[in-house]
Image (cartoon, helix red, strand yellow):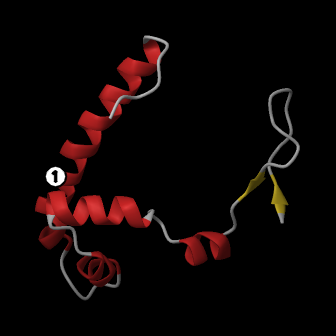
Amino acid sequence: MQRAPQGPRTPPGVYWLTEKDVARLGGRSPAFEHYLSGKCAWSDELERAANADRKSFDDLRPMWACRIGVTRAAARKALAAALKGSGPRR
């Protein structure tokens, strides 16, 4: 287990995820994958194929543009709520 650098605000039980941890957990939560699939017709298979040079990254452009659009709006809403001192609203 690789521990996170300890600082004055770092809880003692914190550690960095290893590549093996990330591979086991996945890069995105199942809920986020479902959200992207519904909102942007996201395809994990197409993404894997593009990463393995079996497909062109140009095939991913429309999905990336959609992903950026939907996540940016949610991030701005969460940031505005945090700046007002409240949690994000759903």
For label 1, the SS is helix
Q: Quadrant of residue 73?
A: top left
> Where's residue 23, x and y in %?
57, 76
Q: Quadrant of the N terminus?
A: bottom right
Q: Nearer the viewer, residue 57 or 15?
A: 15
- Give the crowd class for mark 1: few <14, some 14-19, many >=20 residues within 10 Å: few
Q: Is residue 7 left or right of residue 48?
A: right
Name the residue: 45% across, 63% down.
Answer: 29
Name the residue: 85% across, 32% down.
Answer: 7
Name the residue: 28% across, 44% down.
Answer: 71
> Where's residue 63, x and y in %?
16, 61
Count of numbered tags:
1
* Residue type, label 1: Ala
Q: Residue furthest top?
A: 84
Q: Quadrant of the C terminus?
A: top left
In the displayed structure, would residue 70 be above or below residue 87?
Answer: below
Q: Nearer the viewer, residue 70 or 54?
A: 70
Q: Is residue 5 left or right of residue 70?
A: right
> Where's residue 38, x and y in %?
18, 63
Q: Is residue 28 left or right of residue 76?
A: right
Q: Residue furthest front?
A: 90
Residue ID for mark 1: 65
Name the residue: 50% across, 71% down.
Answer: 26
Q: Residue furthest bottom?
A: 54
Q: Is residue 29 left or right of residue 37?
A: right
> Where's residue 44, x and y in %?
30, 76
